[in-house]
Amino acid sequence: MKQSNKLINRLITAFGGTPLKAVANKLAASALLLLFLLLLTTPTLFAAGAKLFLSPSSGSYYVGSYFSVEVRVNTGGNSTNAYKAVLAYPAEKLEAVSVSSGGSICSLWIPPTPSYSNNAGSATFECGATTAYKGPAGRIGTVTFVAKAAGSYTVSISGGNVKKADGTGTELLSARESASFTIQDLPEGVPAVSSSTHPDQNAWYKEKTVSLSWTVPSAADGYSYIFNSNPEETPDDLAEGNETSRTYENNGDGTWYFHLKARSGNNWSTTNHFRVQIDSQPPEDFEIVVDPPGERITRAPLLSFAATDALSGIDHYEISLDGSEFATTTSPYQFERIKGGVHEVIVRAVDRAGNIKEAKATLEVVGISAPVITKPTEGETIPFLAPLDIRAGTGSAGTIELLLDGKIVATPNTDPGFKIEHTLRQLILPGGHKLAAVFINTDGIESAPAEIGFKVNAGTVYLLGLLIPGFIFFPASLAVLALLVFFLVRRIKRWKKKGVGVENRE
Protein backbone atom coordinates (compact mmCIF):
# COMPACT_ATOMS: atom_id res chain seq x y z
CA MET A 1 0.00 0.00 0.00
CA LYS A 2 2.82 2.38 0.91
CA GLN A 3 4.56 1.55 -2.34
CA SER A 4 1.34 2.30 -4.27
CA ASN A 5 1.00 5.70 -2.59
CA LYS A 6 4.58 6.51 -3.39
CA LEU A 7 4.05 5.54 -7.01
CA ILE A 8 0.94 7.70 -7.26
CA ASN A 9 2.74 10.65 -5.66
CA ARG A 10 5.58 10.27 -8.14
CA LEU A 11 3.14 10.23 -11.05
CA ILE A 12 1.37 13.32 -9.77
CA THR A 13 4.66 15.10 -9.21
CA ALA A 14 5.79 14.08 -12.68
CA PHE A 15 2.87 15.99 -14.11
CA GLY A 16 3.91 19.11 -12.28
CA GLY A 17 1.85 18.14 -9.42
CA THR A 18 1.15 17.93 -5.84
CA PRO A 19 1.36 15.14 -3.30
CA LEU A 20 -1.66 12.84 -2.99
CA LYS A 21 -2.90 14.31 0.27
CA ALA A 22 -2.98 17.83 -1.14
CA VAL A 23 -4.83 16.61 -4.25
CA ALA A 24 -7.41 14.93 -2.06
CA ASN A 25 -7.94 18.16 -0.14
CA LYS A 26 -8.39 20.08 -3.36
CA LEU A 27 -10.89 17.52 -4.66
CA ALA A 28 -12.88 17.76 -1.44
CA ALA A 29 -12.92 21.57 -1.63
CA SER A 30 -14.02 21.43 -5.29
CA ALA A 31 -16.82 19.02 -4.40
CA LEU A 32 -18.06 21.36 -1.66
CA LEU A 33 -17.96 24.29 -4.08
CA LEU A 34 -19.88 22.32 -6.71
CA LEU A 35 -22.49 21.32 -4.13
CA PHE A 36 -22.88 24.96 -3.10
CA LEU A 37 -23.35 26.04 -6.72
CA LEU A 38 -25.95 23.33 -7.26
CA LEU A 39 -27.84 24.54 -4.22
CA LEU A 40 -27.88 28.06 -5.65
CA THR A 41 -28.69 27.26 -9.25
CA THR A 42 -30.83 24.13 -9.18
CA PRO A 43 -32.99 24.19 -6.08
CA THR A 44 -35.59 22.00 -7.75
CA LEU A 45 -33.21 19.03 -7.52
CA PHE A 46 -33.49 19.24 -3.75
CA ALA A 47 -37.17 20.24 -3.61
CA ALA A 48 -38.51 17.43 -5.83
CA GLY A 49 -40.51 14.66 -4.29
CA ALA A 50 -44.16 15.26 -5.21
CA LYS A 51 -46.06 12.51 -6.96
CA LEU A 52 -49.19 12.45 -9.10
CA PHE A 53 -51.10 9.17 -8.95
CA LEU A 54 -54.48 7.61 -9.71
CA SER A 55 -56.94 6.04 -7.32
CA PRO A 56 -57.85 3.25 -7.59
CA SER A 57 -54.67 2.01 -9.22
CA SER A 58 -56.43 -1.08 -10.57
CA GLY A 59 -59.87 -2.62 -10.88
CA SER A 60 -62.06 -5.11 -12.70
CA TYR A 61 -65.39 -4.12 -14.29
CA TYR A 62 -67.96 -5.40 -16.76
CA VAL A 63 -68.62 -3.93 -20.19
CA GLY A 64 -71.18 -1.14 -19.78
CA SER A 65 -70.11 -0.38 -16.22
CA TYR A 66 -69.30 3.14 -15.04
CA PHE A 67 -66.32 3.68 -12.80
CA SER A 68 -64.45 6.72 -11.50
CA VAL A 69 -60.74 7.38 -11.26
CA GLU A 70 -59.43 10.11 -8.98
CA VAL A 71 -56.33 12.17 -9.73
CA ARG A 72 -54.42 12.65 -6.49
CA VAL A 73 -51.17 14.26 -5.34
CA ASN A 74 -48.64 13.27 -2.71
CA THR A 75 -46.74 16.47 -1.98
CA GLY A 76 -43.79 14.72 -0.33
CA GLY A 77 -44.11 16.87 2.76
CA ASN A 78 -44.06 20.16 0.82
CA SER A 79 -46.70 22.90 0.86
CA THR A 80 -48.19 23.19 -2.64
CA ASN A 81 -50.75 25.42 -4.34
CA ALA A 82 -50.75 24.78 -8.12
CA TYR A 83 -51.32 21.57 -10.05
CA LYS A 84 -51.68 20.19 -13.55
CA ALA A 85 -52.40 16.61 -14.61
CA VAL A 86 -53.00 15.35 -18.14
CA LEU A 87 -54.44 11.83 -18.38
CA ALA A 88 -54.13 9.54 -21.39
CA TYR A 89 -56.54 6.66 -21.98
CA PRO A 90 -57.72 4.40 -24.85
CA ALA A 91 -60.94 6.25 -25.69
CA GLU A 92 -62.26 3.53 -27.99
CA LYS A 93 -62.17 1.10 -25.04
CA LEU A 94 -62.63 3.38 -22.01
CA GLU A 95 -64.83 6.34 -22.88
CA ALA A 96 -64.74 9.34 -20.54
CA VAL A 97 -68.22 10.58 -19.71
CA SER A 98 -67.46 13.36 -17.24
CA VAL A 99 -64.83 15.15 -15.21
CA SER A 100 -65.45 16.63 -11.79
CA SER A 101 -63.79 18.97 -9.31
CA GLY A 102 -65.93 17.73 -6.42
CA GLY A 103 -63.96 17.41 -3.19
CA SER A 104 -60.87 18.92 -4.81
CA ILE A 105 -58.08 20.64 -2.89
CA CYS A 106 -58.31 23.27 -5.65
CA SER A 107 -60.52 26.33 -5.52
CA LEU A 108 -59.32 28.14 -8.65
CA TRP A 109 -59.54 26.50 -12.06
CA ILE A 110 -57.93 27.55 -15.30
CA PRO A 111 -60.69 27.39 -17.95
CA PRO A 112 -61.64 25.24 -19.72
CA THR A 113 -60.32 22.64 -17.25
CA PRO A 114 -61.31 20.24 -15.95
CA SER A 115 -62.04 18.90 -19.41
CA TYR A 116 -61.78 15.79 -21.54
CA SER A 117 -61.67 14.81 -25.20
CA ASN A 118 -62.50 11.31 -26.37
CA ASN A 119 -61.15 12.21 -29.80
CA ALA A 120 -57.73 12.83 -28.26
CA GLY A 121 -58.10 10.26 -25.48
CA SER A 122 -57.09 12.76 -22.82
CA ALA A 123 -58.43 14.55 -19.75
CA THR A 124 -56.90 17.70 -18.25
CA PHE A 125 -56.99 19.16 -14.76
CA GLU A 126 -55.23 22.49 -14.13
CA CYS A 127 -55.96 24.43 -10.98
CA GLY A 128 -54.72 26.31 -7.96
CA ALA A 129 -55.46 26.29 -4.25
CA THR A 130 -56.07 29.44 -2.21
CA THR A 131 -55.00 27.47 0.86
CA ALA A 132 -51.74 25.58 0.40
CA TYR A 133 -52.04 21.80 0.61
CA LYS A 134 -49.50 19.44 2.17
CA GLY A 135 -50.37 15.77 2.40
CA PRO A 136 -50.12 12.27 0.93
CA ALA A 137 -53.38 11.99 -1.04
CA GLY A 138 -54.93 15.32 -2.02
CA ARG A 139 -57.71 14.94 -4.56
CA ILE A 140 -57.29 17.18 -7.62
CA GLY A 141 -60.22 15.89 -9.64
CA THR A 142 -62.14 12.88 -10.88
CA VAL A 143 -62.78 11.42 -14.31
CA THR A 144 -65.56 8.88 -14.87
CA PHE A 145 -65.34 6.25 -17.59
CA VAL A 146 -67.77 3.80 -19.13
CA ALA A 147 -66.25 0.48 -20.15
CA LYS A 148 -66.80 -0.06 -23.88
CA ALA A 149 -64.94 -3.29 -24.68
CA ALA A 150 -63.41 -6.25 -22.90
CA GLY A 151 -59.66 -6.25 -22.33
CA SER A 152 -56.90 -4.88 -20.12
CA TYR A 153 -56.23 -1.15 -20.37
CA THR A 154 -54.01 1.48 -18.82
CA VAL A 155 -54.86 5.02 -17.78
CA SER A 156 -51.68 7.06 -17.38
CA ILE A 157 -50.67 10.57 -16.35
CA SER A 158 -48.85 11.72 -19.46
CA GLY A 159 -47.82 15.10 -18.09
CA GLY A 160 -48.26 17.47 -15.22
CA ASN A 161 -46.91 19.88 -12.63
CA VAL A 162 -46.94 20.29 -8.88
CA LYS A 163 -45.83 23.74 -7.74
CA LYS A 164 -44.46 24.63 -4.35
CA ALA A 165 -46.22 27.38 -2.40
CA ASP A 166 -43.08 29.49 -2.13
CA GLY A 167 -44.04 32.52 -4.20
CA THR A 168 -41.97 31.45 -7.19
CA GLY A 169 -43.72 28.22 -8.16
CA THR A 170 -40.82 25.83 -7.70
CA GLU A 171 -41.48 22.58 -9.52
CA LEU A 172 -41.82 19.57 -7.19
CA LEU A 173 -43.12 16.79 -9.44
CA SER A 174 -40.80 13.80 -9.54
CA ALA A 175 -43.09 10.85 -10.34
CA ARG A 176 -46.28 10.02 -12.25
CA GLU A 177 -48.08 6.73 -11.71
CA SER A 178 -50.60 4.93 -13.93
CA ALA A 179 -53.55 2.63 -13.26
CA SER A 180 -54.57 -0.66 -14.90
CA PHE A 181 -58.11 -1.93 -15.40
CA THR A 182 -59.56 -5.22 -16.62
CA ILE A 183 -62.87 -5.11 -18.47
CA GLN A 184 -64.91 -8.31 -18.83
CA ASP A 185 -67.99 -9.12 -20.87
CA LEU A 186 -71.15 -9.43 -18.78
CA PRO A 187 -71.64 -13.19 -18.22
CA GLU A 188 -74.76 -14.93 -19.40
CA GLY A 189 -77.55 -15.08 -16.88
CA VAL A 190 -76.68 -11.76 -15.24
CA PRO A 191 -79.63 -9.31 -15.20
CA ALA A 192 -79.06 -5.81 -16.62
CA VAL A 193 -80.09 -3.03 -14.21
CA SER A 194 -81.60 0.37 -15.03
CA SER A 195 -83.22 3.20 -13.09
CA SER A 196 -86.11 5.48 -14.05
CA THR A 197 -85.21 8.05 -11.38
CA HIS A 198 -81.40 7.95 -11.58
CA PRO A 199 -80.71 6.62 -15.10
CA ASP A 200 -77.11 7.79 -15.51
CA GLN A 201 -74.70 6.06 -13.14
CA ASN A 202 -72.28 8.93 -13.65
CA ALA A 203 -74.70 11.77 -12.89
CA TRP A 204 -75.74 13.27 -9.57
CA TYR A 205 -79.40 13.70 -8.63
CA LYS A 206 -81.28 15.62 -5.95
CA GLU A 207 -84.04 13.01 -5.64
CA LYS A 208 -83.75 10.75 -2.60
CA THR A 209 -86.19 8.09 -3.83
CA VAL A 210 -84.53 5.55 -6.12
CA SER A 211 -86.52 3.26 -8.44
CA LEU A 212 -84.68 0.33 -10.03
CA SER A 213 -85.66 -2.41 -12.47
CA TRP A 214 -83.87 -5.22 -14.25
CA THR A 215 -84.13 -7.63 -17.14
CA VAL A 216 -85.11 -11.28 -16.78
CA PRO A 217 -82.34 -13.69 -17.83
CA SER A 218 -83.32 -17.02 -19.38
CA ALA A 219 -84.52 -19.56 -16.77
CA ALA A 220 -84.23 -17.06 -13.88
CA ASP A 221 -86.65 -17.88 -11.06
CA GLY A 222 -85.53 -15.55 -8.28
CA TYR A 223 -83.25 -12.68 -7.36
CA SER A 224 -81.09 -11.65 -4.43
CA TYR A 225 -80.18 -8.00 -4.06
CA ILE A 226 -78.99 -5.37 -1.62
CA PHE A 227 -78.68 -1.56 -1.72
CA ASN A 228 -75.82 0.00 0.23
CA SER A 229 -72.70 2.17 -0.02
CA ASN A 230 -70.20 -0.67 -0.55
CA PRO A 231 -69.22 -0.90 -4.23
CA GLU A 232 -67.96 -4.51 -3.89
CA GLU A 233 -70.90 -6.05 -1.98
CA THR A 234 -72.23 -9.46 -2.98
CA PRO A 235 -75.81 -10.42 -2.03
CA ASP A 236 -76.43 -13.66 -0.16
CA ASP A 237 -77.86 -16.79 -1.77
CA LEU A 238 -81.39 -16.24 -0.43
CA ALA A 239 -83.91 -15.11 -3.03
CA GLU A 240 -85.90 -11.94 -2.28
CA GLY A 241 -88.61 -13.03 -4.71
CA ASN A 242 -89.16 -12.93 -8.45
CA GLU A 243 -90.19 -9.27 -8.83
CA THR A 244 -88.13 -7.29 -11.34
CA SER A 245 -88.24 -3.85 -9.73
CA ARG A 246 -87.51 -2.24 -6.38
CA THR A 247 -87.88 1.26 -4.90
CA TYR A 248 -85.82 2.67 -2.02
CA GLU A 249 -87.13 5.82 -0.35
CA ASN A 250 -85.59 8.61 1.71
CA ASN A 251 -81.97 7.69 1.01
CA GLY A 252 -79.17 9.81 2.37
CA ASP A 253 -76.69 11.81 0.34
CA GLY A 254 -73.69 10.04 -1.14
CA THR A 255 -72.87 7.23 -3.54
CA TRP A 256 -75.02 4.10 -3.35
CA TYR A 257 -74.80 0.76 -5.11
CA PHE A 258 -77.49 -1.73 -6.05
CA HIS A 259 -76.10 -5.28 -6.12
CA LEU A 260 -78.17 -7.92 -7.92
CA LYS A 261 -77.79 -11.55 -8.94
CA ALA A 262 -80.23 -14.02 -10.46
CA ARG A 263 -81.01 -17.61 -9.51
CA SER A 264 -81.65 -20.34 -12.05
CA GLY A 265 -82.53 -23.53 -10.23
CA ASN A 266 -79.72 -24.11 -7.76
CA ASN A 267 -77.23 -21.83 -9.53
CA TRP A 268 -76.57 -18.14 -8.93
CA SER A 269 -75.28 -15.69 -11.50
CA THR A 270 -72.43 -13.28 -11.08
CA THR A 271 -73.39 -10.06 -9.24
CA ASN A 272 -74.15 -6.96 -11.27
CA HIS A 273 -73.62 -3.54 -9.67
CA PHE A 274 -75.49 -0.31 -10.43
CA ARG A 275 -74.34 3.03 -9.01
CA VAL A 276 -76.64 5.81 -7.76
CA GLN A 277 -75.35 9.25 -6.71
CA ILE A 278 -77.46 11.53 -4.51
CA ASP A 279 -76.68 15.11 -3.53
CA SER A 280 -79.63 16.99 -2.06
CA GLN A 281 -77.60 19.74 -0.36
CA PRO A 282 -76.56 23.05 -1.96
CA PRO A 283 -72.93 24.15 -2.18
CA GLU A 284 -71.27 25.77 0.84
CA ASP A 285 -71.70 29.50 1.51
CA PHE A 286 -69.27 31.66 -0.46
CA GLU A 287 -68.49 35.33 -0.96
CA ILE A 288 -68.06 37.62 -3.93
CA VAL A 289 -64.78 39.53 -3.76
CA VAL A 290 -65.05 42.88 -5.58
CA ASP A 291 -62.00 44.65 -6.99
CA PRO A 292 -62.03 47.57 -6.42
CA PRO A 293 -64.08 47.22 -3.20
CA GLY A 294 -67.84 47.72 -3.37
CA GLU A 295 -67.98 51.32 -2.10
CA ARG A 296 -67.31 54.18 -4.55
CA ILE A 297 -66.16 52.09 -7.48
CA THR A 298 -64.45 54.17 -10.17
CA ARG A 299 -63.73 51.47 -12.75
CA ALA A 300 -65.53 48.43 -14.10
CA PRO A 301 -65.11 45.91 -11.28
CA LEU A 302 -63.59 42.45 -11.30
CA LEU A 303 -65.58 39.85 -9.37
CA SER A 304 -63.93 36.73 -7.93
CA PHE A 305 -65.79 33.85 -6.33
CA ALA A 306 -65.07 30.23 -5.48
CA ALA A 307 -67.68 27.88 -4.04
CA THR A 308 -67.15 24.35 -2.82
CA ASP A 309 -69.45 21.35 -2.77
CA ALA A 310 -68.46 18.30 -0.77
CA LEU A 311 -70.30 15.70 -2.84
CA SER A 312 -71.03 16.32 -6.50
CA GLY A 313 -68.79 19.38 -6.96
CA ILE A 314 -69.48 22.70 -8.64
CA ASP A 315 -70.81 22.37 -12.16
CA HIS A 316 -71.00 26.06 -13.14
CA TYR A 317 -71.70 29.62 -12.01
CA GLU A 318 -74.44 32.04 -13.08
CA ILE A 319 -74.55 35.81 -12.69
CA SER A 320 -77.30 38.45 -12.66
CA LEU A 321 -77.03 42.24 -12.41
CA ASP A 322 -79.96 44.23 -11.05
CA GLY A 323 -82.46 41.40 -11.54
CA SER A 324 -81.52 40.59 -15.12
CA GLU A 325 -81.77 37.05 -16.45
CA PHE A 326 -79.04 34.77 -15.10
CA ALA A 327 -76.24 33.95 -17.51
CA THR A 328 -73.53 31.31 -17.20
CA THR A 329 -70.16 32.72 -16.21
CA THR A 330 -66.76 31.84 -14.78
CA SER A 331 -64.56 33.28 -12.06
CA PRO A 332 -63.07 35.82 -12.22
CA TYR A 333 -65.77 37.85 -13.99
CA GLN A 334 -64.78 41.19 -15.45
CA PHE A 335 -67.47 43.78 -16.22
CA GLU A 336 -66.68 45.32 -19.59
CA ARG A 337 -68.83 48.32 -18.66
CA ILE A 338 -71.17 49.34 -15.89
CA LYS A 339 -73.44 52.35 -15.29
CA GLY A 340 -73.00 54.73 -12.42
CA GLY A 341 -75.24 54.13 -9.41
CA VAL A 342 -75.95 51.40 -6.90
CA HIS A 343 -76.21 47.88 -8.29
CA GLU A 344 -76.91 44.46 -6.84
CA VAL A 345 -75.08 41.51 -8.31
CA ILE A 346 -76.06 37.90 -7.59
CA VAL A 347 -73.82 34.92 -8.32
CA ARG A 348 -75.21 31.40 -8.24
CA ALA A 349 -73.05 28.35 -7.65
CA VAL A 350 -74.76 25.32 -9.20
CA ASP A 351 -73.53 21.86 -8.26
CA ARG A 352 -73.69 18.80 -10.52
CA ALA A 353 -77.00 17.72 -9.00
CA GLY A 354 -78.60 21.09 -9.77
CA ASN A 355 -78.57 22.44 -6.22
CA ILE A 356 -78.01 26.20 -5.98
CA LYS A 357 -76.31 28.53 -3.51
CA GLU A 358 -76.43 32.30 -4.06
CA ALA A 359 -74.07 35.06 -2.99
CA LYS A 360 -74.82 38.78 -3.29
CA ALA A 361 -72.76 41.96 -3.47
CA THR A 362 -73.68 45.65 -3.66
CA LEU A 363 -71.70 47.81 -6.10
CA GLU A 364 -71.68 51.59 -5.57
CA VAL A 365 -70.37 52.92 -8.87
CA VAL A 366 -69.37 56.57 -9.17
CA GLY A 367 -71.18 58.02 -12.17
CA ILE A 368 -69.70 60.09 -14.99
CA SER A 369 -71.15 62.95 -17.03
CA ALA A 370 -73.14 62.24 -20.17
CA PRO A 371 -71.65 63.40 -23.48
CA VAL A 372 -72.82 66.62 -25.08
CA ILE A 373 -74.29 66.36 -28.59
CA THR A 374 -73.52 69.54 -30.54
CA LYS A 375 -74.72 68.35 -33.96
CA PRO A 376 -77.46 67.85 -34.97
CA THR A 377 -79.21 70.28 -32.68
CA GLU A 378 -82.51 69.66 -30.92
CA GLY A 379 -85.37 69.89 -33.43
CA GLU A 380 -83.09 70.26 -36.45
CA THR A 381 -84.49 69.21 -39.83
CA ILE A 382 -82.34 67.50 -42.45
CA PRO A 383 -83.20 66.65 -46.08
CA PHE A 384 -84.27 63.17 -47.06
CA LEU A 385 -81.32 60.95 -48.11
CA ALA A 386 -78.81 63.39 -46.63
CA PRO A 387 -75.98 61.94 -44.49
CA LEU A 388 -76.35 62.67 -40.78
CA ASP A 389 -73.36 64.59 -39.44
CA ILE A 390 -72.90 63.92 -35.72
CA ARG A 391 -70.65 65.88 -33.37
CA ALA A 392 -70.30 65.18 -29.65
CA GLY A 393 -67.86 65.87 -26.84
CA THR A 394 -66.94 64.47 -23.42
CA GLY A 395 -64.72 65.40 -20.51
CA SER A 396 -62.28 62.50 -20.88
CA ALA A 397 -61.05 59.81 -23.26
CA GLY A 398 -63.20 56.83 -24.13
CA THR A 399 -65.86 55.62 -26.55
CA ILE A 400 -69.17 57.20 -27.49
CA GLU A 401 -71.91 54.78 -28.40
CA LEU A 402 -74.34 56.32 -30.90
CA LEU A 403 -77.91 55.08 -31.05
CA LEU A 404 -80.54 55.98 -33.62
CA ASP A 405 -84.07 55.27 -32.45
CA GLY A 406 -82.68 52.88 -29.83
CA LYS A 407 -80.38 50.91 -32.14
CA ILE A 408 -76.58 51.17 -32.00
CA VAL A 409 -75.26 52.61 -35.26
CA ALA A 410 -71.63 53.48 -34.39
CA THR A 411 -69.09 53.37 -31.53
CA PRO A 412 -66.34 55.89 -32.40
CA ASN A 413 -63.45 56.63 -30.02
CA THR A 414 -62.88 60.18 -28.84
CA ASP A 415 -60.04 62.20 -30.36
CA PRO A 416 -57.29 63.92 -28.31
CA GLY A 417 -59.74 66.73 -27.59
CA PHE A 418 -62.28 64.24 -26.20
CA LYS A 419 -64.60 64.78 -29.17
CA ILE A 420 -66.02 62.72 -32.01
CA GLU A 421 -67.05 63.61 -35.55
CA HIS A 422 -69.04 60.92 -37.29
CA THR A 423 -71.06 60.88 -40.50
CA LEU A 424 -73.88 58.36 -40.59
CA ARG A 425 -74.66 57.25 -44.13
CA GLN A 426 -77.78 55.14 -44.04
CA LEU A 427 -81.39 55.47 -45.11
CA ILE A 428 -83.37 57.42 -42.50
CA LEU A 429 -87.04 57.59 -43.34
CA PRO A 430 -88.94 60.88 -43.25
CA GLY A 431 -90.36 61.82 -39.88
CA GLY A 432 -89.16 62.36 -36.33
CA HIS A 433 -86.16 60.46 -34.91
CA LYS A 434 -84.22 60.23 -31.65
CA LEU A 435 -80.41 60.32 -31.52
CA ALA A 436 -78.75 59.19 -28.29
CA ALA A 437 -75.11 59.16 -27.20
CA VAL A 438 -73.69 57.10 -24.31
CA PHE A 439 -70.12 57.65 -23.10
CA ILE A 440 -67.96 54.76 -21.80
CA ASN A 441 -64.69 55.98 -20.34
CA THR A 442 -61.43 54.05 -20.45
CA ASP A 443 -62.20 52.53 -17.01
CA GLY A 444 -65.44 50.99 -18.29
CA ILE A 445 -67.85 53.35 -16.52
CA GLU A 446 -70.96 54.09 -18.58
CA SER A 447 -72.79 57.41 -18.52
CA ALA A 448 -76.48 58.14 -18.75
CA PRO A 449 -77.56 58.76 -22.36
CA ALA A 450 -77.68 62.22 -23.93
CA GLU A 451 -80.61 62.55 -26.32
CA ILE A 452 -81.81 64.98 -28.99
CA GLY A 453 -84.68 64.84 -31.45
CA PHE A 454 -84.45 65.71 -35.14
CA LYS A 455 -86.58 65.37 -38.25
CA VAL A 456 -86.09 64.17 -41.80
CA ASN A 457 -87.96 66.34 -44.29
CA ALA A 458 -89.26 64.64 -47.42
CA GLY A 459 -89.91 68.06 -49.00
CA THR A 460 -86.20 68.37 -49.84
CA VAL A 461 -84.09 65.50 -51.17
CA TYR A 462 -80.30 65.32 -51.03
CA LEU A 463 -78.92 63.69 -54.19
CA LEU A 464 -75.28 63.74 -55.35
CA GLY A 465 -74.58 66.90 -53.39
CA LEU A 466 -77.66 68.68 -54.72
CA LEU A 467 -80.85 69.63 -52.92
CA ILE A 468 -83.86 68.77 -55.04
CA PRO A 469 -87.45 69.73 -54.15
CA GLY A 470 -89.51 66.73 -53.22
CA PHE A 471 -92.33 67.61 -55.63
CA ILE A 472 -89.81 67.16 -58.46
CA PHE A 473 -87.78 64.21 -57.12
CA PHE A 474 -90.59 61.83 -56.25
CA PRO A 475 -92.64 62.20 -59.54
CA ALA A 476 -89.42 61.89 -61.53
CA SER A 477 -88.43 58.81 -59.56
CA LEU A 478 -91.82 57.23 -60.18
CA ALA A 479 -91.57 58.01 -63.90
CA VAL A 480 -88.12 56.42 -64.13
CA LEU A 481 -89.36 53.39 -62.24
CA ALA A 482 -92.40 53.04 -64.52
CA LEU A 483 -90.16 53.29 -67.58
CA LEU A 484 -87.89 50.55 -66.25
CA VAL A 485 -90.87 48.31 -65.59
CA PHE A 486 -92.20 49.00 -69.11
CA PHE A 487 -88.93 47.98 -70.78
CA LEU A 488 -88.61 44.95 -68.53
CA VAL A 489 -92.11 43.73 -69.44
CA ARG A 490 -91.39 44.20 -73.17
CA ARG A 491 -88.17 42.21 -72.86
CA ILE A 492 -89.96 39.36 -71.08
CA LYS A 493 -92.61 39.23 -73.81
CA ARG A 494 -89.93 39.01 -76.50
CA TRP A 495 -88.24 36.15 -74.66
CA LYS A 496 -91.54 34.31 -74.46
CA LYS A 497 -92.28 34.82 -78.18
CA LYS A 498 -88.83 33.64 -79.10
CA GLY A 499 -89.31 30.55 -77.00
CA VAL A 500 -92.70 29.79 -78.61
CA GLY A 501 -91.22 30.14 -82.10
CA VAL A 502 -88.47 27.64 -81.32
CA GLU A 503 -90.98 25.13 -79.96
CA ASN A 504 -93.14 25.44 -83.12
CA ARG A 505 -90.18 24.83 -85.41
CA GLU A 506 -89.36 21.69 -83.47
Image (tube, grey):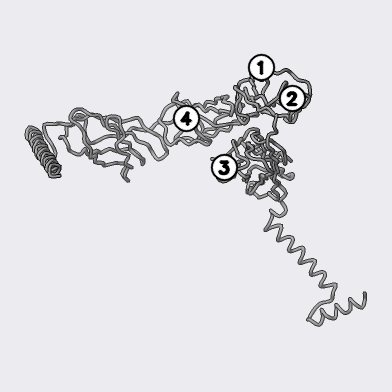
Q: Nearer the viewer, mark 1 or mark 2?
A: 2
Q: Nearer the viewer, mark 2 or mark 3?
A: 2
Residue nearest the viewer, comparing 467 with 235: 235
- Count of labels shown? 4
Query: Tag 4 or tag 2, which sits nearer the N-term?
Result: 2
Q: Are marks 1 and 3 in contact (CB under 8 Å)?
A: no
- Measuring 59% from the left and 44% from the top, which residue is drawn there? 122
| Quarter of the figure with residue 40 | bottom right
Name the residue furthest front: 506
**Is any atom of residue 95 visible in this view?**
yes
Query: Tag 2 or tag 1, which sits nearer the N-term?
Result: 1
Q: Name the mark on residue 264.
A: 2
Query: Tag 3 or tag 2, which sits nearer the N-term?
Result: 3
The kind of secondary structure element at disc 2 is: strand
Amino acid at pointer 1: Glu
Amino acid at pointer 3: Asn
Q: Which residue is mark 1?
A: 249
Amino acid at pointer 2: Ser
Whole-number angstrom distance, CA of label 1 to CA of label 3: 36 Å
Query: Tag 4 or tag 1, which sits nearer the N-term?
Result: 1
**Crowdedness near tag 3: few (<14), some (14–19) or many (≥20) residues, C-alpha within 10 Å:** some
**Is any atom of residue 465 visible in this view?**
no
Residue 495 lies, in percent from the top left, at: 13, 42
Is 317 on the left or on the right of 71, as rendered?
A: left
**Crowdedness near tag 4: few (<14), some (14–19) or many (≥20) residues, C-alpha within 10 Å:** few
Query: Tag 3 or tag 4, which sits nearer the N-term?
Result: 3
The kind of secondary structure element at disc 4 is: strand
The kind of secondary structure element at disc 1 is: loop
Whole-number angstrom distance, CA of label 1 to CA of label 4: 35 Å
Residue nearest the viewer, comparing 61 with 296: 61
Q: Which residue is mark 3?
A: 118
| Quarter of the figure with residue 451 | top left
